[in-house]
Image (cartoon, rainbow, N blue to C red):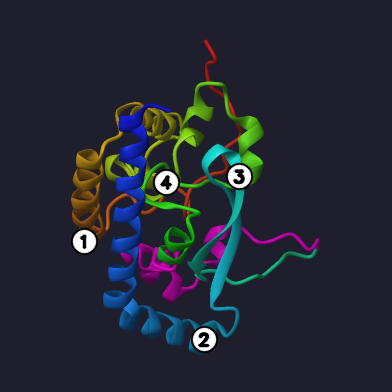
Amino acid sequence: MRKDLRLQRLIKRAFDVCAALIGLILLSPLMLIAACRIYGEAGRPLFFNSVRAGMGGRPFKLYKFRTMTNERDENGDLLPDAERLTPLGKKLRSTSIDELPQLLNVLKGDMSIVGPRPLPLEYVPRYSAEQKKRLDVPQGITGWAQIHGRNAISWEQKFAFDIWYVENRSIALDIKIIAATVKKVLAREGISAEGEATMPEFKGGGNDG
């Protein structure tokens, strides 16, 4: 590893730890209110824990506030997201409050503040060789794809933005992304794909050439 890249990673990790600690301290009252509201509306569990692919495809447990019920159909399969999303869950998603527990993932070293969003582990075998480049860096709470459409853009566009970030990453770019993320959250843009409660499943596909 080049010395400058190693230094950049150390600086990024130090920034992540400081930002996560400050975020948890400042946002803890908001997180407590969210937890109490979830408990009052839907009971336990308060958190939705999902196994995601981290850097290098390493699995880790991602933390989010629970925004859906666990209702199932007569075959025991979960109902579509739109049918399980609670009224409070919609509010938590629209304000991105449901993502705040991921600051704990950052402290643990599972994630970074900025990077490609961690996707379900089962998606990894579906990536093309080019798409796998998104796993070359720590996955993030926000990223280049999130400020360019979030869930309102296609999977192909998301991967293209993620790969661009991997190839052009820098501390200055991370700061730019964080500032843009704040604006996007306040504007509540790109919360879901058209016709979807969140984002359709990634089925695979991409050009290896």
Is-magenta flag for residue 53? Answer: no
The residue drawn where x is 50% and y is 21% is: 130
Closer mark to the observer between disc 1 and disc 3: 3
* Amino acid type, mark 2: Tyr
Mark 4 lies on residue:
193
Q: CA distance from mark 1 to mark 4?
A: 18 Å
The location of residue 73, given as percent across then percent down, is 73, 64
Neighbourhood count class around disc 3 (C-alpha, 10 Å): few under 14, some 14–19, many 20 upward: few
> Mark 1 or mark 2: which comes first in sequence?
2
The residue drawn where x is 37% and y is 26% is: 2
Label placed on residue 186: 1
> Mark 1 or mark 4: which comes first in sequence?
1
User: 146 or 89: which is nearer to us?
Assistant: 146
- Per the rendered image, the range of residues in magenta is 75-102
Task: State if disc 4 and disc 2 touch (CB < 8 Å).
Answer: no
* Amino acid type, mark 3: Arg
Neighbourhood count class around disc 4 (C-alpha, 10 Å): few under 14, some 14–19, many 20 upward: some
The location of residue 90, given as percent across then percent down, is 41, 68
Is-magenta flag for residue 100? Answer: yes
Describe residue 103's horizontal placement relative to residue 175 as left or right. right
User: 202 or 33: which is nearer to us?
Assistant: 33
Closer mark to the observer between disc 2 and disc 4: 2
Where 49 falls versus 12 (above or below)? below
Mark 2 lies on residue:
39
> Mark 2 or mark 4: which comes first in sequence?
2
